[in-house]
Image (tube, helix red, strand yellow):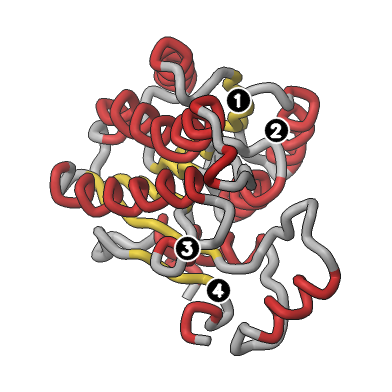
Amino acid sequence: MTEFFSLADKVVWITGSARRVGREIALACAEAGADIVVHCRSSRDEAEATAAEITALGRRAILVQGDHAVRADVRRMVEEIDRVFGRLDGLVNSAAVFPRVDFEKATDEDFDRAIDSNLRGAFLCSQLALPLLRKKPPSHIINLVDWSVERPYRRYAAYMAAKGGLATLTKALAKELAPDVRVNSISPGPVLEPADLGDKERDAIIAKTLVNRWGTPRDIVRAAIFLLGSDYITGSDVVVDGGRSLA
């Protein structure tokens, strides 16, 4: 059974891997045998700590820093990956923001920030990393979407538009990049609590899952490792929401 979970000698780039879910995915990929490209935009201290944990596991790690929604920054980061590793077997587009704002009050800046972080960044990273991903096919792109694309939250219109676009981009790239690159998405449900979530609201969300608990980053990690090791799955979305979408 271990062969199904081995990423031995693979190279995986996880955007937004200084903290939160991205960090957990990076560490899990290292535990599964992969060398890791850690990415951050501004959280350098945390990214360096993540890279240090990966090297302590006996895997190689490099840190690339830049805005994943700026083409010049992404090009520079990809060049660094090519210089160090000369290949890329997996790209996990994890970096994201979750801005909460009333639609009537949303500004152009609010909209642009949501689109840039949640959609444009995945587009640019996938596009510019493609030559490396094609060096040793099959390789993998995984996009972190959101279960609520089908049942949007209130007060998150810009975020929902971006994640909806990312869901469509996943399927489009699965077709366009076949057969060399497998492209899939993961749609987390209640996993990381927003900072402004109250106890009553939190309890109400838990009650609407089928498993009666809040999710953890490890739940997302397991799905990511599964997809990175699965060569016959592409164009699919793995919903990791504890049954929330059925409630």
Q: Are marks 2 and 1 in contact (CB under 8 Å)?
A: yes
Q: Position of residue 225 (x, y in %)?
A: 49, 59
Q: Is residue 20 above or below residue 95?
A: below
* Callout in the foreground (4, 2): 4
Which residue is the site of mark 4? 241
Among numbered discs 4 and 1, the one appearing first in the sequence: 1
Dot in front, 3 or 4: 3
Residue hosting label 2 = 51
Which is in the foreground here, disc 1 or disc 3?
A: 3
Q: Would you name the residue on which mark 3 appears?
A: 152
- For the residues labelled 2 and 1, the Cα–Cα distance comes to 7 Å
Q: Position of residue 242 (x, y in %)?
A: 58, 79
- The disc, 3 or 4, on the residue closer to the chain's N-terminal end is 3
Mark 4 and mark 2: Cα distance apart in space: 29 Å
Question: How far across and how far down the image is residue 109, in percent?
Answer: 54, 25
Q: Who comes first in sequence, dot 2 or dot 1?
A: 2
- Which circle, 3 or 2, is nearer the viewer? 3
Which structural element holds mark 1?
A: strand
Asked whether residue 203 appears in the rendered view, the answer is yes
Q: CA distance from mark 3 to mark 4?
A: 14 Å
Q: Which mark is residue 62?
A: 1
